[in-house]
Image: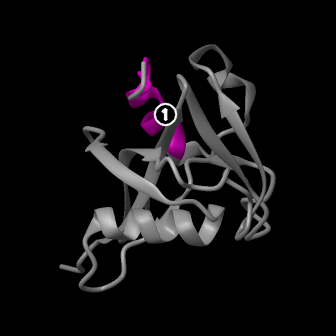
Amino acid sequence: MTERIVVVAAALLSEGRLLAARRSAPPELAGRWELPGGKVEPGEAPEAALVRELREELGVDTEPGERVPGEWPLKPGLVLRVWTARLLPHSAEPKPLQDHDALRWLTPDEVDDVDWLDQDVPAVRALLPWRSPSA
């Protein structure tokens, strides 16, 4: 049996809003929206991977919160797991630095306003209704 590669994604929450990132690459995913994140490296804890990926992709410092129950298959050998996360007080505002060309903060009522990647839809649904850690 092949070991599964875990992809972590952040439900980055701020003031009751969820951050969505629009893919710019690869071409088959460009223009669709996702929760930001990436693959866990060998020997890396998922929470550490989440912090690293958000720094690389968005230029932000974050603190992982709770894992969202469930996991979602991306393709054979890859699964998506989601954690809530919050920006640290000293962090910069998120910017699309790597593999993204736009970011959007969504309220729960706006979550259907973007064209989510198919595999992110059940993860986003599992988050509803979310709560801001500062609320």
On the question of residue 76 being in view, the answer is: no
Q: Which residues are magenta?
A: 120-132
**Residue 23 appears in the rendering:** yes
Vertical arrangement, residue 116 with respect to residue 61, above or below: above
Identity of the residue drawn at 63% across and 25% down = 111
The main secondary structure of the magenta stretch is helix
Q: What residue type is disc 1 on?
A: Val
Q: Is residue 46 left or right of residue 97?
A: left
**Image quarter hosting the C terminus:** top left
Q: Residue at x 58, y 44 (%)?
A: 118
Q: Is residue 47 left or right of residue 98?
A: left
Q: What element does badge 1 sit on?
A: helix
The answer to whether residue 82 is above or below residue 74 is above
Q: Which residue is mark 1?
A: 124
Residue 129 counted in the magenta span: yes
Q: Residue at x 25, y 38 (%)?
A: 69
Question: Is 61 in front, or is 101?
Answer: 61
Give how far across and how far down residue 30 sits, in percent. Answer: 78, 59
When asked about the image quadrant of residue 79, the answer is: bottom left
Seen as rendered, the residue at the extreme front is 90
Left or right for 109, reference 122? right
> Where residue 71 sits in the image (x, y, percent)?
31, 48
Q: Residue at x 73, y 38 (%)?
A: 104
**Residue 130 percent across, percent down from the top left:** 42, 23
